[in-house]
Amino acid sequence: MGPLAGAAFALRLAALTPASIDQQHIPTLLLNDPRIPDRTTARLYGGADPLPAMLRGVRMLNDAGARLIAVPCNTAHLWYEQLAAASECEVLHIIESVAQDLRRQGIARGRIGLMGTAATLSLGLYQQTLEKHGYTCIVPTEEEIDTLCMASIRAVKGNAVDEAFEPAAECVRRLGMRGADAVVLGCTELPLAVPHALRKSLGIALTDSIDALALAAISHYQAHTADADEALVAADETVAA
Amino acid sequence: MGPLAGAAFALRLAALTPASIDQQHIPTLLLNDPRIPDRTTARLYGGADPLPAMLRGVRMLNDAGARLIAVPCNTAHLWYEQLAAASECEVLHIIESVAQDLRRQGIARGRIGLMGTAATLSLGLYQQTLEKHGYTCIVPTEEEIDTLCMASIRAVKGNAVDEAFEPAAECVRRLGMRGADAVVLGCTELPLAVPHALRKSLGIALTDSIDALALAAISHYQAHTADADEALVAADETVAA
C-alpha cells in the first residue's frame, strides 16, 4: 500500500468527523506497512502474493479489538472476499463506499469515468460494482492507464506529489470529453495527486475513494456504536495500494 | 491527543522519508486514540489522569513489535520519564527533536519564541531543554497563551482549521517583535494551524514539532535498522495532545 495514502485516510477520517473536542473523535489504529508486495505487480505480472501479509494485518487488527476495518487501497479489494472472510469484524468495501458517495453527491445514474491502477481497471473491480448499481463505466485506454493514471500514482508513491497532478488532471479531462458525468479517483494515491483546492478547476464531479471510505467508516461508527468507548475503526494499511 | 495531529504526523513521516516506491517507506503503526483524557486539563486543573491510558498504549505498541516509539503530542511529554521507563524500545523525546531541528536549520543559539499548550508552557517543558542547549526562551503572556495559542489549538481540535491560522500567526508576530530568532510550533496542532504554504509570509524561522519528530524518527530508522524488514516505528497517538 501507499504510506501517504494510508496516512491521508487517517487525516481525512479525523477531518470529516463531526467533533469539537478530541474525545468526540473515532479511536483508530492505522497499520501502515509498506513492505506488503505490490498488488498490481502480483495480479498482472506474477509478482509476490500480498495476501499472506494482508491476512496477518487483519488478524493483528482483530486481536487489537477492531470493530470495523477499512482498507484504504482500491487494488487490495481484488482480495476483498478473502480478507472479509478472515476478519472477525466487518470490513468495508471501498468500491461500495464510492458508489454510496456518488449517490450522496446526487449522481444516481449516468456515465462514470474510472481512474485507478492497471490491475483495478483491467480486472474490472469498479465496473462490476458500478454496473450492478446501474451506472455505465468509461475506462481509459491501456496507454492512458500507463502514461496518465499509473504515472500519477507512481509520482505520489515516490514522494513527488507535485508531479502527480498534471497526468491525473489530463486523464480527468479526457474522460470528461468522452461523456463522463463524474470521475472516480479509484486509487488512494489519486486524491493526493489531485488536491481538494484544485478540483473545482477541473469542471467535473469527482468522487474520491479516500473520502468515500472515510465517510462510510464515520457512518458505520455513528450507526453501530452506542457505546463509543469500545469502538475502534482500524485502517488496515497493511493492505493499502 | 489530537486525531488530526496524529494523522498529520503519519503523513509527514511518509512525506519526509527518502523513498521512490512503497517498499522503501518505514513500516508504522499509528495508535490514534482520542479518548485519552486531556493532558492540559489533567496537569493544570485536576482533570482525569491520562497516564494509565498512555501506558496501555506503550504496552500495545511494544507487544506489536515496535522498535521505536514517537509520541506526536508535546504536552504528553510532561509524562515522558514514565512512558520511556515503561517501554521496551526507545521513545523519542519531542523537545529534543525540536532542538535538533533548530541546529539543522543553522540556529545554534539565540532567542527562541515558544508556542504550545498552557501546560507545556507554564510547566517549562521547552524552557528546561532549550536552556540546557544554550538557547534563551521567550514565552507569551498568560493572556496570549489563552487567546492566541490555545484558541488556535482548540480550533484545530474542533476541525475548524481555517480559524486556527490567524491567532497562531499573531502570536508568531508578537514573539518576533520581542526579539525571537525563531519560533517553536510546540504543540502538534500548531503545524496544522500554520500550513507550510503560509510560513514564508511570517518572515521568521519556524520549527515544527511534527516535522522535527518525523525527521528524528527517520534518522533513527536509518541509523539503527540494518535489517529494514524488522523495523517498525510506532507513533503512539494514545498519547498525542
Image (tube, coloured by chain):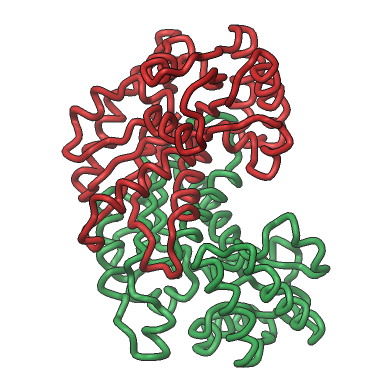
Chain colours: A green, B red
Asked if residue A66 shows in the view, the reply is yes
Q: Position of residue B199 (x, y in %)?
A: 67, 37
Quadrant of residue A172 within the rendered picture: bottom right
Residue at screen point 19% across, 46% down: B63
Residue at screen point 64% across, 15% down: B179
Quadrant position of the N terminus of chain A in the picture: bottom left
Q: Where is residue B34 in the image (x, y as percent from the top left)?
A: 44, 34
Instruction: Judge by depth and name the residue closer to the eye, A166 or A56.
Output: A166
Q: Is residue B65 above or below residue B84?
A: below
Instruction: Judge by depth and name the residue closer to the eye, A188 or A165.
Output: A165
Asked if residue A96 shows in the view, the reply is no
Q: In this view, does B40 lie to the left or right of B55?
A: right
Quadrant position of the C terminus of chain A in the picture: bottom left
Residue at screen point 64% across, 63% down: A162
Q: Is residue B16 left or right of residue B76?
A: right
Q: Is residue A215 above or below residue B125?
A: below
Q: Position of residue A49 (x, y in %)?
A: 30, 80
Q: Position of residue B171 (x, y in %)?
A: 66, 20
Q: In this view, does B22 lie above or below B118?
A: below
How many marks on residues? 0
Residue at screen point 55% across, 66% down: A156
Instruction: Judge by depth and name the residue closer to the eye, B104 or A81.
Output: B104
Q: Is residue A99 above or below residue B74?
A: below
Quadrant of residue A51 within the rendered picture: bottom left
Which residue in the rendered view is the most extreme toward the left?
Answer: B88
Quadrant of residue A165 within the rendered picture: bottom right
